[in-house]
């Protein structure tokens, strides 16, 4: 594959029925999240998975609810990495920290940095940190949208080094 992994993955997401949103930086991410949340009237319906993500969103002025797996309508999370070739999104327990995702919300928003998008799963798994996660989940957007959730949004943030 000679194409950029980000573009390959964007094509897969759109073909699967998901929405791919490119953000030039973290400020652009916050602005686009605000716009989507306002447009869809989700202000009181969003749950973030992970304390670091929640802190980042709060710092940007975006507040989320506490997790209630039975009633979560809109969930937002970080991913570990993305394998562009087969459009797999890898989620680890390190990214969701103490929050266990028992079932997917109806609407799922995933945030990925361009540095996390690789060509294949092997490269993704090689990027696992020294602190091995307890759980690794691979999401196939096409299957997820057909079987588990109604909507998938993937916000991709341009970066050289992932923000911690």
Image (tube, helix red, strand yellow):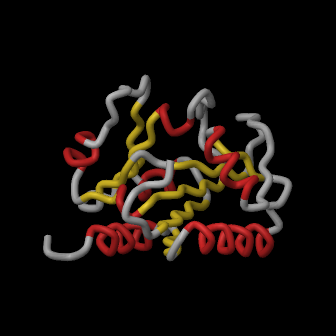
Residue lying farthest to the top in this orientation: 134
Against 98, residue 138 (above or below) is below
Question: Residue at 50% of width from left, 47% of height from top?
Answer: 164
Residue 115 percent across, percent down from the top left: 35, 60
Against 111, residue 96 (above or below) is above
Q: How many marks?
A: 0
Against 113, residue 81 (above or below) is above
Instruction: From the viewer's side, name the closer residue of 147 and 29.
Output: 29
Residue lying farthest to the right in this orientation: 44
Residue 127 vs residue 108: left or right?
A: left
Residue 68 vs residue 135: left or right?
A: right
Residue 102 vs residue 89: left or right?
A: right
Image quadrant in which you'd find residue 68: top right
Instruction: From the viewer's side, name the closer residue of 164 and 152.
Output: 164
Question: Residue at 36% of width from left, 55% of height from top?
Answer: 116
Residue 74 percent across, percent down from the top left: 70, 53
Residue 143 percent across, percent down from the top left: 43, 52
Instruction: From the viewer's side, name the closer residue of 161 and 12.
Output: 161
Question: Residue at 60% of width from left, 36% of height from top?
Answer: 103
Against 145, residue 148 (above or below) is above
Residue 108 percent across, percent down from the top left: 60, 54
Question: Residue at 61% of width from left, 27% of height from top?
Answer: 98
Image quadrant in which you'd find residue 102: top right
Quadrant containing the N terminus in the rendered view:
bottom left
Residue 112 vs residue 149: left or right?
A: left
């Amino acid at each position: 594959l000679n194409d950029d992994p980000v573009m390959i993955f964007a094509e897969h997401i759109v073909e699967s029925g998901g929405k791919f949103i490119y953000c030039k930086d973290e400020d652009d991410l916050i602005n686009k999240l605000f716009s989507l949340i306002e447009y869809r009237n989700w202000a009181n319906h969003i749950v973030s998975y992970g304390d670091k993500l929640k802190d980042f969103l709060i710092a940007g002025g975006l507040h989320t609810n506490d997790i209630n797996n039975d009633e979560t309508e809109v969930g937002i999370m970080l991913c570990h990495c993305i394998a562009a070739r087969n459009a797999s999104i890898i989620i680890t327990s390190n990214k969701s920290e103490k929050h266990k995702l028992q079932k997917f919300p109806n609407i799922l928003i995933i945030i990925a940095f361009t540095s996390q998008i690789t060509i294949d799963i092997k490269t993704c798994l090689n990027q696992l940190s020294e602190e091995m996660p307890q759980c690794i989940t691979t999401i196939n957007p096409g299957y997820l949208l057909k079987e588990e959730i109604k909507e998938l949004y993937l916000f991709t943030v341009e970066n050289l080094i992932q923000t911690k």
